[in-house]
Amino acid sequence: MKKITSRRRFLQRAAALSAAPLIIPGSALGLNGAVAPSNRTGMGFIGVGGKGTGGLANFMRCPEAQPVAICDVDKVARDNAMEMTGLPPESAYLDFRDLLARDDVDAVLIATPDHWHALMTIAAATAGKHVYCEKPLSNTIEEGRAVVDAVKRAGVVFQHGTQLRSFANIRYVCELVRNQRIGALQSITIGSPPGLTMGHQPIMDPPERLDYDRWLGPAPHKPYTTRRVKAPKELPGWYFISDYSKAGWVAGFGVHDMDIAHWGMDTEHTGPVAVEGEGVFPEDGLFDTVTTFRLAFQYANGITITMTDTGENPHGVRFNGDAGWVFTRGGIECDPPSLAKTFVGPNDIHLYESDFHERNFLDCIRTRRETITPVEVAHRSTSAALVGGIALKLSRRVEWNPENERFVNDAEANRLLSYPMRAPWRL
């Protein structure tokens, strides 16, 4: 009887199970606002220090993103990112090329020092990966054009880390300018932070956690000192060293403001025709890029962008028209005050709308739409800043042809459009 009873119970349970609905978590089906795993973008993160960690956190806020791999030459940064994501140990990499070889990596965030941006973006695009690259796009103008060509050739989606474009007030200000609410645009004034100085630093052995040779990559070999790479609670030193950031803070930070100026002026796909300026450079020490500066960028439309450090002008972008002015770097200041309440109507010029830079990138991967800061636009804002850096370095006026991206009858300036890379790296 025991065998008969057991069989009867088994059949009863089987019948009950077959009649009951199969319960599958809504997240697996993409229900209730969740994104099904098959529709998520597999993300690899290359460079997960300060800026990279912030970018990783932003992408983790997006249900459309699925972190799958981490790469950093600093073990501490790498381990911190692994802890944030909960990824298994085999998802951590020292060499970015190993990360790019993964089939489940659909897109990458590149948040390394500037001298790596171009090489890594080109490698990622060539591998068929979509790219979100932090600013500035490149370290030289030649690199920037090579990046544009590689991205377009591969047909991948690209987003530049000039995320101020995803601020509603900045878009609104640029729409006011485009629709001539300040009258005819006459000039633009930018205030951007100055560079820093740093005395000579003691030479030391690199810490065991850091693969210093990989960190240097295409840059010249220089002895290690903590301040060259990063010191706790300080801006990384490489921002202000020309081996890694050719124009220093003018491009490293000023590219944000140049991008806003280009957006409002409708010069996103071109550049200045002449630049002149003067700046103060450190006379000695570890840092060698410009500290305080004043630059004038002249454009073919007759507009001049005056860019200074914030000792002369407040941090932000001011558009000056013949009927008023408007200033922004997230907020809005204007004269007359009524400009801040001006309605942009349905028949007016409306600019690309994005409320979250990382999500815009992910949305464009899905739709194949161009991002709010596509690669050509990124190159033009970066290259304008780099031309400014060359004018400061030469301490004289330079004539620039934005069509062929060469200086006009100026061999000395043209030699600064590119620099040799340390072997085996090359464009």
Image: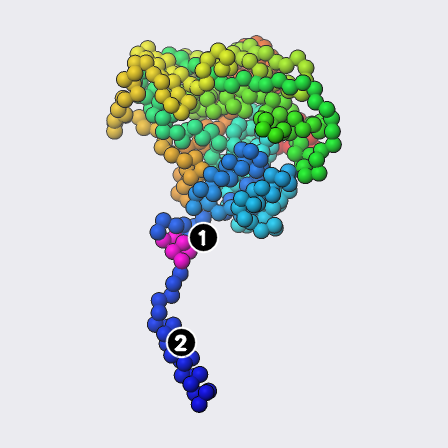
Q: Secondary structure at mark 2?
A: helix
The image quarter in which residue 61 lies: top left
- Residue 173 picture location, percent across and down: 35, 22
Which residue occupies the extreme front position in the image?
A: 2
The image quarter in which residue 97 lies: top right
Task: Give the camera-side residue of 237 and 6.
Answer: 6
Q: Report the Cα–Cα distance between label 1 and label 2.
A: 31 Å
Vertical comparison of 380 with 47: above or below: above
- Residue 417 picture location, percent across and down: 59, 22
Q: Earlier in the sequence, mark 1 or mark 2?
A: 2
Residue shown at 69% from the left, 30% from the top: 422
Task: Give the class, few, some or many, for how many residues have Cα within 10 Å of label 1's Cα (few <14, many ≥20).
Answer: some
Amino acid type, label 2: Ala
Q: Which residues are magenta?
A: 25-31
Q: Which residue is mark 1?
A: 37
Q: Secondary structure at mark 1?
A: helix
Residue shown at 36% from the left, 31% from the top: 352
Residue shown at 71% from the left, 38% from the top: 208
Task: Give the camera-side residue of 5 and 160.
Answer: 5
Tell me the quarter of the image containing the N terminus: bottom left
Viewer-nearest of discs 1 and 2: 2
